[in-house]
Image: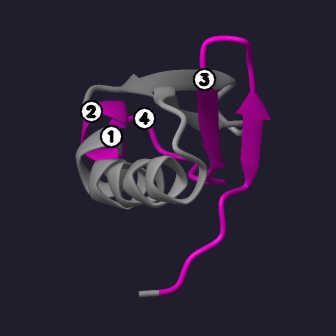
């Protein structure tokens, strides 16, 4: 598997992963379902590599002006 985390933010409590998608549509629930496995894989990799928790996964849709949280 290969991938790139668009933005990894370290906080005092752990990491926040933000993935940018230039999707112009309006079916946001489908976008979350489509990309959730990718962000969860990033979470597992970051936690394994750093030993610190990932506390939030966010999907940024700049065309729609939205940031959606991915449940894990």
Q: Is residue 17 magenta?
A: yes
Quadrant holding the C terminus: top left
**Residue identifier under label 2:** 29
State the residue in front, 2 or 63.
2
Which residues, given as a range, are shown in magenta? 2-31
Q: Pointer 4: what residue?
A: 26
Q: Are marks 1 and 2 in contact (CB under 8 Å)?
A: yes
Q: How many marks are shown on the rendered structure?
A: 4
Q: Position of residue 19 (x, y in %)?
A: 61, 48
Q: SS at mark 3?
A: loop
Q: Position of residue 61 (x, y in %)?
A: 62, 38
For disc 3, the marked residue is 14
Evaluate if marks 1 and 3 touch, with contact meaning CB atoms under 8 Å apart: no
Residue beneath the point at 23% across and 46% down: 33
Query: Residue 70 or 9: which is nearer the viewer?
Result: 9
Q: Quadrant of residue 18?
A: top right
Location of mark 1 (residue): 32
The first of marks 1 and 3 along the sequence is 3
Indicate left or right for 31 with 43 as reference.
Answer: left
* Label 4 or label 1, whichever comes before in sequence order: 4
Q: Nearer the viewer, residue 31 or 69?
A: 69
Callout 4: few (<14), some (14-19), or many (20+) C-alpha neighbours within 10 Å?
few
- Which structural element holds mark 1? helix
């Amino acid at each position: 598997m290969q991938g790139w985390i668009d933005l990894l933010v370290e906080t005092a409590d752990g990491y926040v992963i933000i993935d940018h998608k230039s999707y112009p549509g309006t079916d946001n629930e489908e976008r979350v379902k489509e990309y959730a496995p990718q962000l969860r894989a990033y979470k597992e990799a970051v936690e394994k590599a750093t030993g610190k928790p990932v506390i939030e996964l966010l999907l940024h849709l700049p065309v729609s002006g939205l940031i959606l949280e991915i449940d894990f």
